[in-house]
Amino acid sequence: MPVITEIADLKRIYKRRVPKMFYDYAESGSWTETTFRENTTDFDLLKLRQRIAVDMTGRSTASQMVGQDVAMPVALAPVGLTGMQHADGEIKAAKAAEKFGVPFTLSTMSICSIEDVAENTDKPFWFQVYTLKDDEFMKRLFARAKEAKCSALVITVDLQVMGQRHKDIKNGLSAPPKLTPASVANMMTKVPWGLEMLQTKRRFFGNIVGHAEGVSDGSSLSSWVAEAFDQSLDWERIKQFRDWWDGPVILKGILDPEDAQKALSVGADAIIVSNHGGRQLDGALSSIRMLPQIMDVVGDKIEVHLDSGIRSGQDILKALALGAKGTMIGRAYVYGLGAMGQKGVTEALNVLHTELDRSMALCGKRRVDELDPSILLMPEDFSNRWKAAV
């Protein structure tokens, strides 16, 4: 058993263990991948102020996210195809999150279905939906999420059209993977992964196959997705979705202060500052760089979370110091899942918690609600407003 002390340890094991198609799916962005890279490197521009001689006994990372008690202000983000990273991946990730005490968010594009996860967990989880044109399918999704007692709905609003992800196209990404000479040759080097996948029946998109009209198997899924996403999405449509759900609604994909203001007007309970992990609009600013501008506009009028680029507990600390009430991790937990299954997700959460707790202490803070920009040192131009070209 290797000693895991940082997320990078899990990533190295993950790369060795999982087929290239699915590794590339997680570890890539759109077009030139500039935004994908800056999501992480912009965190490095923020430095921490070390403080000494402060009583550090009785520390706690406990907090709340949309009214839910959490062991630390971190939720597992919705990630598609998680069940291809490890057999029954969504179930294993949800179990790890439940045991640790943080929310798990199930993606519409998951391999394990809503019902699969609900049957294998004891506590409510969050459910993420895309904005699709088919009202009947959407209503059924909402109803299934309510039946599963999902405690919050996460609506992804930044995927009316899909950013071009070169690696996915070149790899012929599909679930289950298409058997080509290249994919077969690569999978033959991933024997443990393959043996585990053979032991599960969950290899298709469980929330869609058998539920969406005209989709009976994975072979027609890609064309269905291309046709199903609602390119006419507007704020009235988002408000309609909000009205369909009687619990907390979180809007994921806010990257502009004006859009953050509009999220208030449609009754969202929280927003997630996110650029989809750099997988949508390449050339957009990083989530952490946009966070201060959005906080300037919405302040404490709405709960703000941050997603995209988090790879350490210090990244979480910096986001909280800039005003976020919570954060979401995607790749960081996927590395653990692909590397070691449920145990790997737990390892990832332990690493992040240890880094958050100790870094918070070295900054002279004992609780997350004490965090503010005073613990940061940043370039003068970090949070400057970029002006739209006229």
Image (cartoon, grey):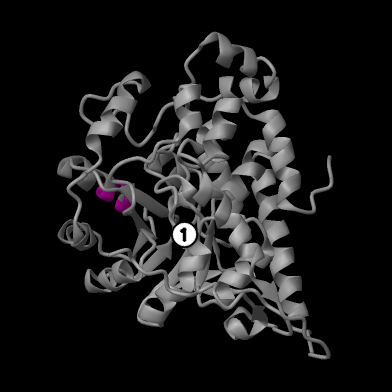
Q: In this view, does 25 lie to the left or right of 313?
A: left
The region drawn magenta spans: 142-146
Q: Name the residue under label 1.
A: 285
Q: Position of residue 314 (x, y in %)?
A: 68, 66
Residue 298, image quadrant: bottom left
Mark 1, Cα crowd under 10 Å, few <14 / some 14-19 / many 20+, is many
Residue 152 at what x, y percent from top left? Answer: 37, 60
Rendering quarter of residue 107: top left
User: Horizontally, is 162 left or right of 276 in the view?
Assistant: left
Residue 106 position, x and y percent, is: 44, 47
Q: Residue at x 23, y 36 (%)?
A: 228
Residue 98 seen anywhere in this rendered image of the structure: no
Quadrant where the C terminus sits is: bottom left
Picture residue at 37% right of the left edge, 51% below the top: 128
Which residue type does callout 1 highlight?
Answer: Leu
Q: State the image coordinates of residue 112 (x, y, percent, origin top left).
A: 45, 36
Of residue 169 and residue 175, the one placed in the foreground of this image is 169
Looking at the image, is 128 positioned above or below residue 221?
A: below
Front position in the image: 71 or 109: 109
Residue at the spot 62% in from the left edge and 18% down from the top edge: 187
* Residue 109 visible in the current orientation: yes
* Above or below, 163 relative to 74: above
Callout 1: SS: loop
Q: In which quarter of the image is the N terminus?
A: top right
